[in-house]
Image (spheres, helix red, strand yellow):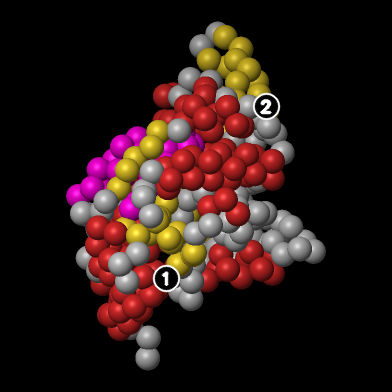
Amino acid sequence: EWTPAAFVDTTVQELKDKLGNDKVVLGLSGGVDSTVAAILLHKAIGKNLFCIFVNNGLLRKNEFDSVLDQYKHMGLNVKGVDASERFLKALELKTDPEEKRKAIGNAFIEVFDDEAHLVEDVHWLAQGTIYPDVIESVSVNGPSVTIKSHHNVGGLPDFMKLKVVEPLRMLFKDEVRRVGKEMGIDPELLGRHPFPGPGLAIRILGDITAEKVRILQEVDAIFIDGLRKWGLYDKVWQAGAILLPVNSVGVMGDERTYEKVVALRAVESTDGMTADWVNLPYEFLQETSNNIINRVKGVNRVVYDISSKPPATIEWE
Ligand code: XMP
């Protein structure tokens, strides 16, 4: 029978045997998977684990600083690297979803590679890949049909020449959370919704600008804080806001406005492979919509996404 305690014991021992005295680099994303992978490795090899947390400028509002702080408190050997400008530049004028993913993936690899080179004598790259990532990249994003290329899965550029270690490769998300809980990771961090590697870039349809990122961060924060306040956060598997590439007409006082539309998305799921939209209370949607429109300059309309996966996907890009 599978238990988190047994998984931790076995995996820590396996990692010790496999890695010995070798140094390992790992990219932390702020998400559950990379965090749990890091803590497992930290248990196994301690200071030989070098964590790198890159700010791509596409994270949620305030997330980089607060999560970096949290990692430090967990005793991880972690370096925060603010590469926001570099990512924005790489994304400039890109509108195609897959091109955006590629640009972000490449920028990430460059930044990560620069940082990994600063660690002397490193032999391994650790990743928080989980089972659904493995299957999606094989069967969905395989050679014949590419739906979405998850940039954090699969081939490394040759120049990195690191061996890969993926301790969560056989686990589903709920198992990863149980393993994290077993190791004493903060329940709030473990309960965080999944967040895509390319971040807000795939929730801003069309091209990305610093101003659009700022707008979406504000909207997203109001939505997510509202879910927490209403006790709905943990009832939802994943939620977020999408900035649409259209303006719509509105009215404010005596003035006609012509401003952005945002969509809110909240889904129930167990592993992201299928998902149902969540029937959020109208009162909650009403309050959230008012808060967004009143507080976020540049947005005059809020819509709620009532599509399930399939045939829609969770993200809009
Ligand atoms: P979709 O949109 O394919 O999303 O229904 C399924 C789950 O995967 C996340 N997602 C990504 N995660 N890189 C990631 O690391 C990506 O490019 C990416 N695209 C989608 C999405 O947030 C959802 O949890």
Quadrant location of residue 117?
top left
Q: Nearer the viewer, residue 160 or 55?
A: 160
Which three-letter amino acid code belongs to the residue tagged 1? Pro
Disc number for residue 222: none
Q: Nearer the viewer, residue 196 or 41?
A: 41
Look at 37% across and 91% down and name the residue there. Answer: 1
Inter-mark Cα distance, 2 to 1: 37 Å
Residue position marked by numbered label 2 in the rendering: 93
Look at 43% across and 31% down and name the residue there. Answer: 218
User: Can you give x and y, in whole percent of width and height, for residue 14 in the image?
Assistant: 35, 79
Looking at the image, residue 178 lies above or below residue 251 = below
User: Can you give x and y, in whole percent of width and height, for residue 204 in the image?
Assistant: 59, 35
Q: Does the magenta run of residues contain 271?
A: no
User: For the residue carrying disc 2, how many other residues have a C-alpha within 10 Å: few (<14), some (14-19), or many (20+)?
Assistant: few
User: For the residue carrying disc 1, how many other residues have a C-alpha within 10 Å: few (<14), some (14-19), or many (20+)?
Assistant: many
Q: Nearer the viewer, residue 5 or 206?
A: 5
Q: Secondary structure at mark 2?
A: loop
Disc number for residue 167: 1
- Write down the region rendered in magenta: 50-73
Q: Residue furthest right?
A: 144
Q: Is residue 197 visible?
A: yes
Looking at the image, residue 234 lies above or below residue 86 = below
**In the drawing, does residue 58 fall left or right of residue 99?**
left
